[in-house]
Image (cartoon, rainbow, N blue to C red):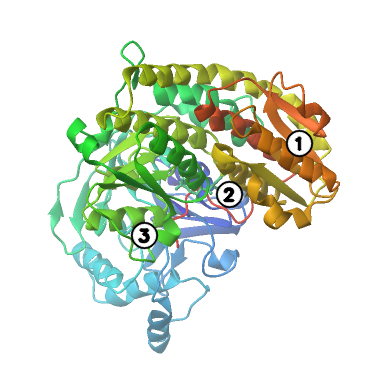
Amino acid sequence: MCGIVGYVGGRDAAPIILDGLGRLEYRGYDSAGLAVQNGGGVQIRRDVGKLANLRATVARNPVDGHIGIGHTRWATHGVPAERNAHPHISMNGDFVLVHNGIVENYLPLKEELLRDGVTFTSETDTEVIVHLIEKYAQQADDEESIVEAVREAVARLTGAHAIVVLPTRRPHLLIAIRIGNAGGVAVGLGDGENFIASDIPAILEHTRRIIYLEHRHMAVIRADTTTITTLDGAMIKPQVHHIAFDAVSAAKGEFKHFMQKEIFEQARGITDTLAGRVDREHAQIVLHDLNLTPEHAASINRVVSVACGTSYYSALVGKFYLEKLARVAVEVEYGSEYRYRDPLLTPGTAVLAITQSGETVDTLAAMEHARANGSTVWSIVNSIGSQAMRLADGFIPMNVGPEIGVASTKTFTASIVDQYLLALTLGEARGVLTAALRRQYVEDLARLPDILGRVIQLDDEIRLLSGSLYGFRDFLFLGRGIQYPIALEGALKLKEISYIHAEGYPAGEMKHGPIALIDADMPVVAIALQDALYDKMISQIEQVKARGGRVIAIATEGDATIASKADHVLYLPACPPLLSPVMTVLPMQLLAYHIAVWRGTDVDQPRNLAKSVTVE
Ligand code: M6R
């Protein structure tokens, strides 16, 4: 949450910072600000609301200089308001600073600073950091002692932080610090210029050479040098990563919204996530980055999947794969709950983190717990170079390109497919899959892109259907078996982007309570494919209809019965049952998308949300 950008070099800093913030706006859009310095001093511009407001402010009142920092905020302490926007400045103006994270002990620190005579101008926790730095830097008269003062100040903070400091008395120097998992700090190395960003898309246009700051590392960055130390001052020789990046996939192209584009590119996404991993001829799966020997794979007898939000629902689908194809026991846990008990991690347990951003703090904490307890830790992750990739013993990159829409879509389907690949790998290593079955499952995978390509053609029908649905206040989504997680995901998508209350429910549980809610004012979306649970789904649809409910059914092409049971039927092609969640989620995503568009909400940046959740 929150996005940070920094620049030092020979170019005009403001456009670089604003463009970078534009690529990080998915991380927060409550307010934005920048500080740029030249020989005449530091110039700060801040505005509440989206980045467009800050751009307009800067256009009206330009800034000029070759060094600067910027921030886009997701509010935690203090309402979205200009006074709470970053950058924050110290009382004497010697330091400006941007921050991502929460200063958990900010109240006692604030009291201490108030006693010292400091005046606060915001309600944020962040402001204590900049005043603390100034306090420790009172005697600092050279760069070394300024850096030391920053070290002393951050040593007082508890919590997780990403911080960038601009010491205004040394306006050719930026200091970046990472403590814990507060959203990452990447340093981009240029020629005669250097960059800082919370996430690499913000700076990849300028450089592909990236250093990721590790926990308790500090970078002192000038135009021509970057020095990395620990917070104790020990020198670090950093690893420089060379990043490949497809700029086209980060652009909206012909689509109205990123979410729409990302829904549409799922057929390609599946092809991309399978690329180089499936040897159809020999029915073999190759997961290079998992670093898994057949012996190690064979020793795994339990998987604990940890994730949040949409990624959690993906893990619920993955449980079906790992249990059926690999015969491994699976528990699926919310990252945010897992860390607050004392979970049992037996030998032979692998903890599998699923995370688009690779920066979700709760998921990372679960990974750290697993690692500390000696478990194998894997991740399925989309953001290249993110913490979840680096913390894991092995990982499966989703490889679907940046996902910009705050509501996850293409990474949901890709991560499901990646779990299928993992299950096939473990199934083979554990000797529980015959060659013939493996071949069948691999062949099923190869059909998926074509199936998704056909489903996406329902777009116009769903757009029109949404026109008759967008006025309702409540929705119920029903599914059974492997479709239950899809009912949950359908409800989450609708809530997130249209602000309509929706619940996902296992259809068989409806009669145990939610049936009391059924009336003509609560549309029910029911997934009723012609699979093993079809008859049971039909009887649940009958129960809804008997109580005057309105049913939108997701059914299989050629089903001659269902049209007489439901008010509207969306027909999907036949699909291998295990892979059908990858297909059935598409109409759910399109329904949420079109309903949101009809309602005029901000589809790509829905209120109160942020793309990566780096605070608890
Ligand atoms: O980056 P992650 O996959 O770890 O994010 C987890 C959730 O925050 C995320 O899936 C969230 O629920 C999305 N807004 C869903 O659309």
Question: CB of mark 2 within 8 Å of CB of mark 3?
Answer: no
SS type, badge 1:
strand
**Distance from Cα at disc 2 to Cα at disc 3:** 20 Å
Along the viewing direction, whichever of 477 and 414 lies nearer the viewer: 477
Q: Which residue bears the numbered disc 1?
A: 552
Residue depicted at x 40% and y 59%? 338
Q: Amino acid at mark 1?
A: Ile
In this view, 96 is above or below 117: above
Q: Amino acid at mark 2?
A: Leu
What is the quadrant of the C terminus in the image?
A: bottom left
Residue projecting furthest to the bottom: 115
Residue depicted at x 56% and y 44%? 406
Is residue 425 visible in the rendered image? The answer is yes
Q: Which residue bears the numbered disc 3?
A: 163
Q: Mark 1, mark 3: which one is toward the viewer?
A: 1
Along the viewing direction, whichever of 157 and 147 lies nearer the viewer: 157
CB at disc 3 and ligand 1 closer than 8 Å: no
SS type, badge 3:
strand
Say the numbered circle drawn on residue 51.
2
Is residue 602 visible in the rendered image? The answer is no
- Of mark 2 and mark 3, the one earlier in the sequence is 2
Residue projecting furthest to the top: 281
